Image (spheres, rainbow, N blue to C red):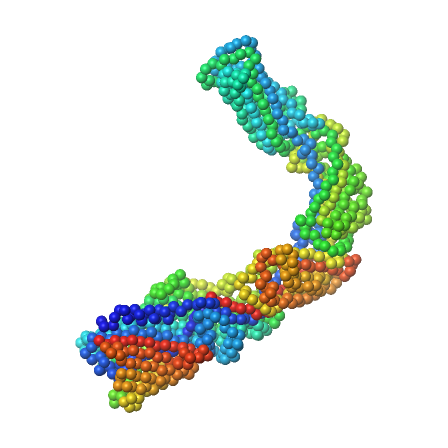
Amino acid sequence: MIISMRNILLLMGAVAMLWSCSREEPTTWNIHGAGPVAFGRLSLNDMVADSLLSADETGLWHLVFTDNLTDFNLDSVIAIPDTTIHRSFVVPLIGGPFSIPPNSTIIGLDDENVLNIPQVELKEVLSKGGTLQYTVTNYVNGYLTCTYTLPGITKNGQPAVLVAAASPGSAGDPATSTGTLDLTGYHIDLTGESGTSTNTILSEVNIKTSPDAPSNAEVYGQDSVVIDLQIIEPLISYARGYFGEHHYEMDETVSFGDDIDLPTGVLNLNQISVDFKVENNVGVDARIEFSGLTAENSMTSSSVALVNPAFFSDMNITRATDVNGLVIPTYHEVSMNEVNSNVDAFIETLPDAISVQADVDINPLGNVSDNNDFIYTDKPLNALMEIDIPLCIGMSNLTLEREIELEEASDIPWANGTIYLKMVNGFPLSALVDLTMVTPEGTVISGLLSNAYLAPAPGDGSTNQGTAESVFAIAVNDSWLAQWASPNKLLMSVSFNSNGETEWVKLTTSGFIDFVITGDITTEVSVR
Amino acid sequence: MRALIAIMFLMTSATMFGQTHPLILFYGDSLMTDKHAFIDISVIGALGSDHVNNSFIEKMYLGGHISDEELDALVAESGERNRAGMDARVGMQWWDLHTGLFGNECYRLMVSVQHENHAYAAYTDDLFKLGFRGNSDFVGKRVELAPLNMQYQAFQKFGVGVLDQSTYSRAQLSFVTGQDFISLDMNRARMTTSSDLDSISLFYHGDLIMADPDKHGFGAGKGLGAALDLEWNLPMKDGEGWFGVAVYNLGFIRWNGATEHYDLDSTFYWTGVEINDLFDVEEDLTMPALQDTIGYELRTGNQWQLMPMDVRMRMLRRLNERIFIDAGIALQPYQQSIPELRVAVGQDWNGKVMLTEQISYGGYSGFRAGVHVRTQLGAGFIVQAGTDNVPGWISSRARGRDLVFGISRIF
């Protein structure tokens, strides 16, 4: 063949080059698009946590807020302190040395150990934590096995048995052996050998030469074995006994601003009620005298003290009953409303904290239970406040604020145009809407909407009287689109207004705000 | 997306499968008698459109920004029905000129190998405007997106045939391996944007076929087929010219069982992303992927597909020793092109150099003016080069561009 392979390859190479023209940049063009972006419906339970809302039979929303003002901390009353029990056992012989063969008992006796728990006489406890650490110190010249049985400390019906093997020791050079026992789940009987004592742990000691000792023990009279028991950080889940008479002065502030995202502004409430309830799950009597309950608003530095005679009278709290582990609590309740108290002003403060002052007496009548006070530490004596606010309200600039994290609009190189926010308001409330893009430090980057007026639905919300439509235009431009990215944020602020703060409107389950976001945007399409 | 755009715009006009060129028909006897073989390598590629211009095609293919002015002009120039297409072929053929077949000294064995790409798109003006200008001008109006027809085929042919050296007529049977096939046919499709922008509705009815999407690249082997290429040349009685009829790619490809067939028949109604919690929109405000929102039924299985057949008729006649004319018509019945008419005037310098100037109309494009040159070099080489569309190489506003280059050797 005369056409050379070289020439063919050259030609093929040229063809391949022609075919392999590759894109060095994307194809782009500008496009002007219009259409819907998003839609949705806001009802009140979208703006307020579901757990705080309840609708009555008429469809009227109630804001129901329950908080535990305080747990009266009775755990500390029956707390067992860290305790060390030091016991020395002497060989009951005189003279010596005596050669004692293996597996021979040299000391055996029962013993009682008393725990030092001031003002409290416990008969039994159930432990949920803590450690029993033991140390055996052997002054006897022989291999010993020390068995320390605690018949009153049981788990699943079996007593705790501490067994320590001690090497030979001497008066000048004793041998020690240590070990620990996890007290979790142990029942501790503190009635001692008699069964009627309190704070007393019975123990049985048996010390003998080790069965497998290689040689006889050489024992002198008055040689001793010392046992140290340490109860370290004991935790109690249940206790019974007499817990003593105690007096406390309580001064606490309960903050709940983080829990319920409180609005700011002026609120006028109607038919508000507050139920105050002391729930006693503990088998002790108590007397509580509240001396102050104050609503505090840290934003406005305002506060309102509750006024209600019944609340500030002595409350005698009867002990709970334990029926085979089932606790039947007792209650003391005080109901407050706008007639017998100033709860409306109290709540209208829009408090983010409530301070409580009280004097509390435990067992004011002494040991009337014959050492049968009880406590399950997970069931305390507590004070609950339940606030029920029917949302028949007047408001002026009641403002909800939300921060929305931004995600980078990385696929959009630039855009100009308008985003439309159409809102159909079914609430009889007007609102001023602000939408601002801010830096993490709060510096305003761009005000997207400023005091945009959302018209109210006609009527007072009693009946379904229609809706009002408002359309807001948000200009889209490169300057703010470029900054539409984390860590910047979108700050949304909605200030609600009724027709004057003293005119009440009803927020019902039929109320809503429909919104539709549409766009009419010019941007660049890029195809790689 | 890119593939669809590539299909739509990287396309060919010209019916580029030239019949036997005049140099061989006029001088074949002297060139090929008592020779051993003829070998030919050729490259043919053509883009064409009756709508989009070269600037647009280049940017769609090679990248770059298409200006608003360009697009506005293209929108203004678009008709109700617009076409664009591409044909490309690289091939090699070999004729045995020494040994007769079937007891006839004029019958010769021929073999060939070639790779071909064919694509076309036919679309409405509304679709083009929607895609490149957006829907803003269509608010409150209906956008007619159909009829829309797009197709891309790529395959390799391995042919064996018989050449009648007395007329250079030939018949060739080829084994075909399919490299790729995508076809979209929308019979009815329309889109409406509501006046207050709160909804966009899209109705569509059609089908999309994609050959085995798991295989890629040259010689992917997604299907097998067979094709006939026939060319019949009839000399005029006075010996001063020829009539010719040719059919290329008369055949089929059976695309394999992994071919995906999408039945597109649904109405899609877009009202935006539903946000359940305006104050916690991060999770809600995620745009759904288009493929998740388009309604379709998918089935897989073999697909029998006709190959892009090309039918040609021509008349070649000498007016005198120096001047001849070459006129013909080409049809691609399975493509979206219209019949292509062409008339060429040639100058012949004793077969050493032939120059033809051509005017043509049809295919995927409108009127075009072209020029071709064929020349004998020493040692039996014949080189041909040309274009059917000279303005396509000069003006970015011309609609299409093509190139033919071939080198042959007779020995």
Q: Is residue B313 above or below residue A187?
A: below
Q: Residue furthest top?
A: A95
**What residue is at 60 percent from the left and 20 percent from the top?**
A87
Is A482 situated left or right of A430 in this image? left
Vertical relation: B130 (above or below) A108:
below
Residue situated in front as seen by the camera: A140 or A133? A140
Task: Residue at 23%, 80% (x, y): give it.
Answer: B31
- Percent x, y of residue A471: 66, 67
Task: Out of B350 and A81, give the one closest to the viewer.
Answer: B350
Q: Quadrant of the N terminus of chain A?
A: bottom left
Instruction: Please state the horizontal and vertical placement of residue A46, each as a whole percent of the image.
Output: 65, 56
Q: Is residue A490 visible?
A: yes
Q: Residue furthest front?
A: A172
Q: Position of residue A467 (x, y in %)?
A: 70, 64
Q: Which image quadrant is residue A199 in?
A: top right
Figure quadrant of residue A394? bottom right
Residue in view at x 62 percent, y 32 percent: A235
Q: Toward the viewer: B405 or A361?
A: B405
Which residue occupies 35% across, 69% down? A16
Residue with the most extreme left position: B103
- Can you give x and y, in whole percent of width and height, for residue A266 in the image? 76, 55
- In front of the other: A426 or A345: A345
- Quarter of the image for residue B165 reads bottom left
